[in-house]
Image (tube, helix red, strand yellow):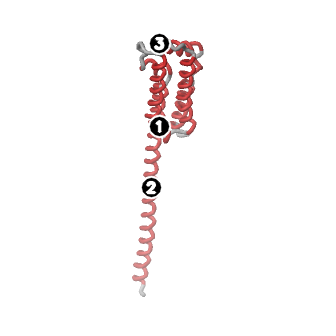
Amino acid sequence: MDNSSIIILAIAIIVGVLGVYLFAYFREIRGVKKEQKKTAFDATLQLQAYERLTILAERISLKNIMSRVSPANMPAAVYHSLLVESIKQEYEYNLSQQLYVSAQAWQAVTNLKEQNIFILHQLAATLPGTATGLDLSKRVLELLDADPKASLHGIVLEALRYEARQLMSGK
């Protein structure tokens, strides 16, 4: 083997090794970019879920649910059933959001739903059989006005905001 053949072979080996290295490097870069895009996409889905759950918490707050479901001349028992059903429907409509938020955030929303239903059951049980939906709505408002902390609504909203801020700050 002469010197020119050895030089060509050495150059071929160097080019081959360099080619393999560059191929691996660019493949890794593409993987990192793909992972960054996936992470950004996941963060976007999570933020959207926190937004959705914030809306849910607002929609199932006792004051807001009563403003949407009018007691218009109905018996308290019927109004009670409509309020409970509305809360359950709102919650069920958003069940998929639990995939994107922490277990604690989802549990907080679930606790809010359960507490609001419990409050409605308890207050409805204190009313006479002849009570109207308006009587029930007055009882609920009296409870909330007497003790604004009677509802988990504010605490749940703050927990959702906190987790969303943590996500946005990258922590």
User: Residue 171 sits in which quadrant?
Assistant: top right
The spot of residue 152 in percent (x, y) is 57, 25
Residue wearing tag 2: 31
Q: Position of residue 142 (x, y in %)?
A: 55, 12
Which numbered disc covers residue 134?
3
Element assignment for label 2:
helix
In the picture, the disc for residue 95 is 1
Residue 97 x/y as whole percent: 47, 38
Q: Which residue is situated farthest in the front direction here?
A: 129
Which mark is in front, 2 or 3?
3
Mark 3 neighbour density, 10 Å: few (under 14) some (14–19) many (20 or more)? some
Q: Residues within 10 Å of mark 1 (few under 14, many from 20)?
A: few
Q: How many labels were placed on the picture?
A: 3
In the drawing, what numbered circle is on residue 129? none
Identity of the amino acid at label 1?
A: Leu
Which of the two labelled residues, at mark 3 and mark 1, occupies the earlier sequence position?
1
